[in-house]
Amino acid sequence: MDTLFALLSQLGPVSEELKSQISAKLQFAKFKRKQTILWQGNVCDNLFFVSKGLLRAYYEKDNEEITSWFMMENDFIISVLSFFRRIKSYESIEALESCELIYITYDDLMELYANSLEFNIIGRKLTEHYYCKSEERLLAIRKQTALEKYEFLMQNYPDLTQRVPSKYIASYLGITQETFSRIKAIY
């Protein structure tokens, strides 16, 4: 939990009172490798912080799993549309490694926002951070060649190729497994 508060403190001041309010609402969970944390079609009720492990979000299209993102240690994970709009998720979230997560429910998060200007500032900065990451990924995927996509991955997430099966990375990059293998071999 110290890592979580250290991260939050980088985004804005976290008073002892706010730390206490947040701590009272946090819960802990462990998931085994290949365990699903959120199933497509369910509402995402929790915002998770990854203390340990690696997860992926994916959706199905034409009987194929399409990986939309990966999150690892010190990242937050949710199905964004489902969590904030309170609708069924179009994606699933799966543990790729054994995971230790800290989480807060939607209702508890909204209560913190309603009662704390400090927490609103932190939440805004965190949202800005992940929105920018999402935009960077979209630009990389839409406007680049397969090699440029791989280079983007290596510059921004070099550990993924050691921790994630190639089929998931290829799907994330929007290229075939064969193309991914060829590029990885020459890079």
Image: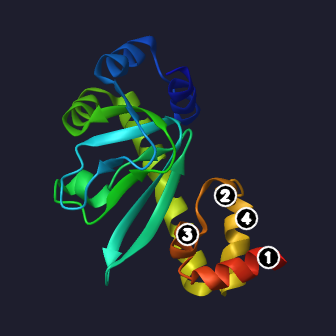
**Circle 3 sits in a helix, a strand or a loop, which is it?**
helix
Q: Amino acid at mark 2?
A: Tyr
Q: CA distance from mark 4 to mark 1?
A: 13 Å
Where residue 170 appears, as percent x and y from the top left, is: 57, 75
Q: Nearer the viewer, mark 4 or mark 1?
A: 1
Crowding near pointer 4: few (<14 within 10 Å), some, many (20+)?
Answer: some
Residue wearing tag 4: 154
Name the image quarter holding the C terminus: bottom right
Contact between marks 2 and 4 (CB within 8 A): the answer is yes
The residue depicted at 48 percent of the width and 62 percent of the height is 69
Residue drawn 64% across the image and 57% down it? 160
Q: CA distance from mark 3 to mark 2?
A: 11 Å
Q: Return the residue nearer the eye: 152 or 161.
A: 161
Q: Position of residue 166 (x, y in %)?
A: 60, 68
Spatial CA span between label 2 and label 4: 5 Å
Please, what is the three-letter code of the amino acid marked with disc 1?
A: Ala
Q: Secondary structure at mark 2?
A: loop
Ranked by sequence position, the earlier of labels 1 and 3 is 3
